[in-house]
Amino acid sequence: MDVLPSQEEAGKDLGILNLANTVGQVLAPVIVGGVVATSSYATIFPIAIVCVLVGAVVIMLIRKVK
């Protein structure tokens, strides 16, 4: 709550956070199923590593608590 841009719109921001968590859980099985169907299971690991690195960079961009 401390890093949200506006305390007045905290509900909207938390809703967007919840949506971001849910979308990944919905899309990941579809994407992984498509990759495994067209390639091999081992292809998933480099893709997962790239996703983790992108996520780490995005998290580091979050501004500090005031």
Image (cartoon, rainbow, N blue to C red):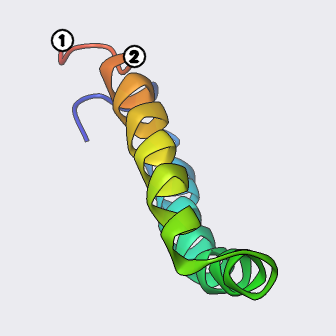
Q: Which residue is found at the position 22% from the left and 14% from the top?
A: 64
- Circle 1 crowding by C-alpha within 10 Å: few under 14, some 14–19, many from 20: few
User: In the depicted view, which residue is nearer to us: 27 or 9?
Assistant: 27
Residue type at mark 2? Leu
Q: Is residue 26 above or below residue 21?
A: below
Q: Is 10 on the left-hand or right-hand side of 31?
A: left
Circle nearer the N terminus (1, 2): 2
Q: Is 5 on the left-hand or right-hand side of 35?
A: left
Q: Is residue 57 above or below residue 26?
A: above
Q: Disc 1 to disc 2, how far (Cα)?
A: 15 Å
Residue type at mark 1? Lys
Q: Is residue 60 above or below residue 8?
A: above
Q: Which residue is found at the position 63% from the left and 77% from the top?
A: 40
Q: Which residue bears the numbered disc 1?
A: 66
Q: Position of residue 30 (x, y in %)?
A: 72, 84
Q: Quarter-wise, where is residue 22 in the image?
A: bottom right
Q: Position of residue 4 (x, y in %)?
A: 38, 32
